[in-house]
Amino acid sequence: HRMTFAMNDDQGGANGKFTSFEFPDKVPAPLNMAAAILGNTEMLTLVEKIKMVPGLLPMLIRGQDFIDEQDEYSVSEFMEKYGMPGRINDEIFIAMGKALDFIDPEDLSMSVILTAMNRFINESDGSQTAFLDGNQPDRLCAPIVDHVKARGGTVMLGKALASIEVNDDDSIQCIKMADGSEVRADVYVSAMPVDVLKRVIPTRWSTMPYFCQLNELEGIPVINVQIWFDTKLTSSIDGLCFSRSPLLSVYADMSTCCAEYASDTNSMVELVFAPCTIKAGAERDWISASDNDIIDATMGELARLFPNEIGSNTPNPAQITKSTVVRVPRSVYAATPGRNKFRPSQASPISNLVLAGDFASQKFLGSMEGAVLSGKLAAEVICDGAAGRDGMELKDVDPSVKSRKDEKKPVGIRGDTPIAFGGGQQGDANAKEVHV
């Protein structure tokens, strides 16, 4: 497999040039990673590669303990500490940071970069990316629903949570829904995004350090863009590409990469637009911009990546037939330096509550892999409790967390849009909700 990067403009990027790190088949990690890095001569010099070693060797020797300790450093601070040349940041870390957490390296915890690189070092396929072969509702959500129903479970859609009702011993009595109905269970699992969970924490829980630490976590904004063209972009790469653009993170031509969108005549390019707020490192608050402004800016970057098919170099540039802009004001938690110590364990101080979600404590940070691993850890907590086994211990809350002296009533979830529940949404009219 390979990791593909668009070249910078001074390296031919303005002419649609790409370069790849080729990971050889049937070569175990970390040897396949070493071969990929040494085999690419277009991004880093041999001297620059050697100067990466002092910062990465402790990770190979000490593993996760070393990674956790670096959470207090930004990528830029870590590079300065270990004497890494600035070009490593320009060539590699900026692209990785924007792809992994939608933030520029000055504001990103180094533990994010090291977590990814640790997988590259220890897993032969750790750097490989893949796509669902269709849309998420049909190819991911529907099979999960079928699995639950086949085992006697019930999946309720369109049932918004209104409040969590608690007993005198702080355990959950029931979940009240917006339509007035109640859900009662032996054990409750919350997989809500951290920003949504903070809005529904019951008054009785609001002074507990376990829940107070959630105030140190906040979702990062991101924009997803999809553009359909009237022709096939023949220079598209079969796989995910790191754009190394000031505006775009990663992108892929789904007509080449995904079975559902496969086409020999028309391209559908999907892109991650990040960072998209000034706080995250953008020059303007793109998440509040109009769809037209975002599409125009995206097309400007695509003209650099595809100069002979979209740019001014071609007499018949590809034309947009359809486009969508999906704003996610609060996606994965912002992995700024020092956040890991505030991530709660799946086990909670509430006897019948277990937390899941990528923000809960697990080694894969804020990601799909992190959400899955967190769910598995939550399931282990439930199974251990049901079997009477000793299981996950409650993670200590960092001493810096200040417990509330006064109880706080939950503000609740306002609105019924996807954004209100931590999702993404199309349409210029939703820009005002970004700041809610």
Image: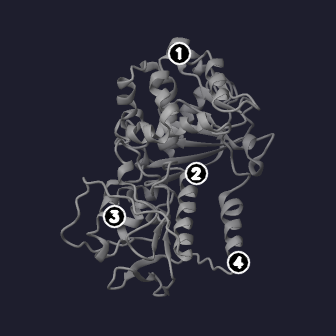
CA distance separating discs 1 and 4: 58 Å
Instruction: Tell me where residue 37 appears, x and y as whole percent.
Output: 61, 22
Q: Which of 247 and 69 lies nearest the eye of the viewer?
A: 69
Looking at the image, do the residues carrying marks 3 and 4 touch, with CB atoms under 8 Å apart? no
CA distance separating discs 3 and 1: 50 Å
Instruction: Tell me where residue 364 appears, x and y as whole percent.
Output: 52, 48
Q: Is residue 64 left or right of residue 107?
A: right
Q: Which quadrant of the view contains residue 108? A: top left
On screen, residue 104 above or below 221:
above
**Residue type for callout 2:** Glu
Residue marked by disc 4: 151
Specify the label residue 369 is tagged with: 2
- Quadrant position of the N terminus in the picture: top right
- Secondary structure of the residue carrying numbered label 3: helix
CA distance separating discs 3 and 4: 33 Å
Disc 3 or 1, which lies upstream in sequence? 1
Q: Which of 306 and 353 lies nearest the eye of the viewer?
A: 353
Disc 2 crowd, CA 10 A, few/some/many (<14, 14-19, 20+): some
Disc 1 crowd, CA 10 A, few/some/many (<14, 14-19, 20+): few
Residue at the farthest bottom position: 181
Q: Residue at x 61, y 15 (%)?
A: 41
On screen, residue 250 above or below 12:
below
